Amino acid sequence: MINLKVVSPQKVIFEKEVEMAVLPGAEGDFAAMPNHSPFISSLRPGQMVTMSANKVDESFFVSGGLVMLKEKVCEVLVDQIESLSNVNISNYQQSKTFQELEGNETALGTFEQVVNNPPYK
Amino acid sequence: MPNLKELKNRISSVKSTRKITSAMKMVAASKLRRAQDLAESSRVYADSLSFILSSLAGNTKNSSDLPEILTGRENSKISLLIINSSDRGLCGGFNSNLFRNAKNWIGEQQEKGKSVKIITVGKKASSFYRKTDLNVIANFDDLNSNDKQLQVSEEIKNKIMELFENNEIDEVSILFNKFVSVIAQEPTYQSLIPLSNEEADEEVTDTSNAVFEFEPDKNELLEYLVPRNFLTQIYRSVLESSASEHAARMTSMDNATRNAGDMIDGLTLTYNRTRQAFITKELIEIISGAEAV
């Protein structure tokens, strides 16, 4: 198990033990698992998921950020994060994320893509 | 002998002042709790970010490989000071302490032959520095009224990046009241350009046993990290300053409420004495009048 800690500029969003987390790294998606070599990467807008037994547990959209991976800790510094489990496509445009992302065209485009057709299901 | 009516008016006016100050104290106390929570919870992000930045910078052996914006320019001539004040008054020595401190700092810089530019945050600083002959290049108001702190921090960051690239400034420092405790706030400087090394130094030794791989390469990562670090540091100082402001207001309003109470006691005593004196005087008049008959 690896300790996944998700932090935004305002607060710690959540911290929990997961078997594996898949993150949208700047140069391609990668999986964070225990005993990964120490690794720092920036994130592109995309989908972040936590997995156990090859199944997706939870799915999120991240608008970009940084990740720092150490032996048993995976620290994700996100700009914005939104859970995808109960996003309703018809009303997501009114949601807070939409308004906050307004200034960021690429993140917004990716958000629509990820909501309509998530790479990990 | 003081007029009874006058005394009564004064007592009631001090009483209503006391009502106002005690209400302000309550408001400040509840806002303080929120601001303090925000300042504390934002620390996690800021700490992690400066950890990443320092391990990245520490990993680069030759400091001349690092961009100027991290290490600062040699022969720096122009310093920029960002002053975090409040939008509203009635918060004790909060702003005046800050301005006195800034004045000393500016003096020191000028002795070193540097010229100083200023960015003010908050209405109090902008109205104070408007009257001086210092070079104020921008000011940002009204941060706390509708949670614009992050947005304004972003604007300040963009401004300083632009100024640095155009060679209009060589150094950047930020001055804010650090929240030490509810009764103590301390004017504090933090250097943004060059990056202050206080925390970085101890953390680099900490990371030396864990060598990180970086993706994309270091320079691209730095390009993302440097502005992000400015934003975080500015945001943090704004939050600290707002927590300090509410704390300062709470203590000074508490004092004001207590002083008003003392004043009311004193005035009531004088009022009663005067009233008694009037009654005695009237009695004497009646008695001596009766005796004369």
Image: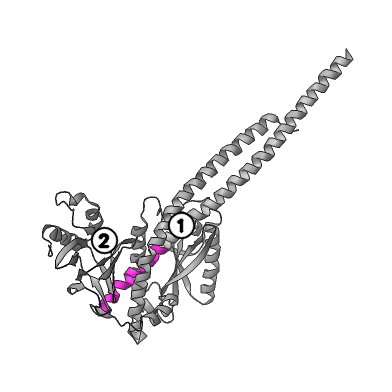
Q: CA distance from mark 2 to mark 1?
A: 24 Å
Q: Picture coordinates of residue B40 (x, y %)? A: 41, 61
Confirm whether circles 2 and 1 share one chain. no
What chain is tagged by disc 1? B
Instruction: Please say whether residue B2 is visible from this viewpoint.
Output: no
- From the viewer's side, name the closer residue of B149 and A111: A111
In which image quadrant can residue A46 be found? bottom left
Range of residues picked out in magenta: B216-236
Q: Picture coordinates of residue B85 (x, y %)? A: 47, 58
Figure quadrant of the N terminus of chain B: top right
Most distant residue in the right direction: B292
**Residue A49: which disc?**
none
What chain is tagged by disc 2? A
Q: Is residue B281 above or below residue B42?
A: above
Q: Secondary structure at mark 2?
A: loop
Q: Secondary structure at mark 1?
A: helix
- From the viewer's side, name the closer residue of A3 and B176: A3
Instruction: Please say whether residue A88 is visible from this viewpoint.
Output: yes
Decide whether the magenta segment is chiefly helix, strand or loop: helix
**In the image: residue A54, left or right of residue B75:** left
Amino acid found under the numbered disc labelled 1: Ala
Crowding at dot 2, Cα within 10 Å, few <14 / some 14-19 / many 20+, comes out as some
Q: Which residue is mark 2?
A: A80
Q: Which residue is mark 1?
A: B243
Taking the spot 48% from the left edge, 55% from the top edge, the residue there is B245
Q: Is residue B63 above or below residue B257?
A: below
In which image quadrant can residue B8 be found? top right
Figure quadrant of the C terminus of chain B: top right
Taking the spot 67% from the left edge, 39% from the top edge, the residue there is B265
Give the number of marks: 2
Taking the spot 65% from the left edge, 42% from the top edge, the residue there is B263
